[in-house]
Image (cartoon, helix red, strand yellow):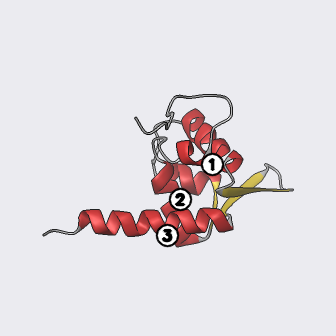
Amino acid sequence: MWGICLTRTRTESPFNELFRKGAPEVLIYLLMVERARYGDIRRQKFVVGDRSLSRLLKGLQSGGLIAREALPTYPISTNYSLTNKGKEVAELLKSLKALLSKKE
């Protein structure tokens, strides 16, 4: 094969994080809106539950694709935005999505 391991491990690479359900959609969404709160992302229904979304966002953050900013409000508000690497990846995903949706 190509030597790419897509199994789940504790230390995921950013490459593997792209194949999690909802990851491309979250990255493209953040590219469009630039910054979003957790609730805004949840309302888009990219993944089924809160736990899945939390895991997805933590994975994308640990992969260096998104940045998390906790605001000192009550209750705590959390903003997510793309890092420079995340912007590059989201642009590629957006282009790939456009290419694949073209009809010949």
According to the picture, the residue beneath numbered tag 3 turns out to be 91
Left or right of 29 in this view: 57? right
- Identify the element where label 1 is drawn: helix
For the residue marked with disc 3, what is the amino acid?
Answer: Glu
Where is residue 21, by image quadrant? top left
Specify the quadrant that holds the C terminus. Answer: bottom left
For the residue marked with disc 1, what is the amino acid?
Answer: Leu
Which residue does the image show at 49% across and 38% down from the upper left?
4
Of the residues under marks 2 and 3, which one precedes in the sequence?
A: 2
Extreme residue toward the left, this view = 104
Looking at the image, which is closer to me, 31 or 16? 16
Q: How crowded is mark 3: few (under 14 residues within 10 Å), some or many (20 or more)?
A: some
Image location (x, y in percent) of residue 99: 29, 68
Left or right of 81 in this view: 30? left
- Do residues under tags 2 and 3 come within 8 Å of each other at their CB atoms? no
Of the residues under marks 1 and 3, which one precedes in the sequence?
A: 1
According to the picture, the residue beneath numbered tag 2 turns out to be 27
Relative to 82, is 42 above or below? above
Image location (x, y in percent) of residue 85: 64, 64
Which residue does the image show at 67% across and 29% down from the upper left?
10
Numbered tag placed on residue 60 in the rendering: 1
Numbered tag placed on residue 38 in the rendering: none
- Do residues under tags 1 and 3 come within 8 Å of each other at their CB atoms? no
Image location (x, y in percent) of residue 40: 57, 57
For the residue marked with disc 2, what is the amino acid?
Answer: Leu
Q: How far apart are marks 2 and 1 (CA)?
A: 9 Å
- Do residues under tags 2 and 1 come within 8 Å of each other at their CB atoms? yes
- Identify the element where label 3 is drawn: helix
Which residue does the image show at 64% across and 56% down from the upper left?
65
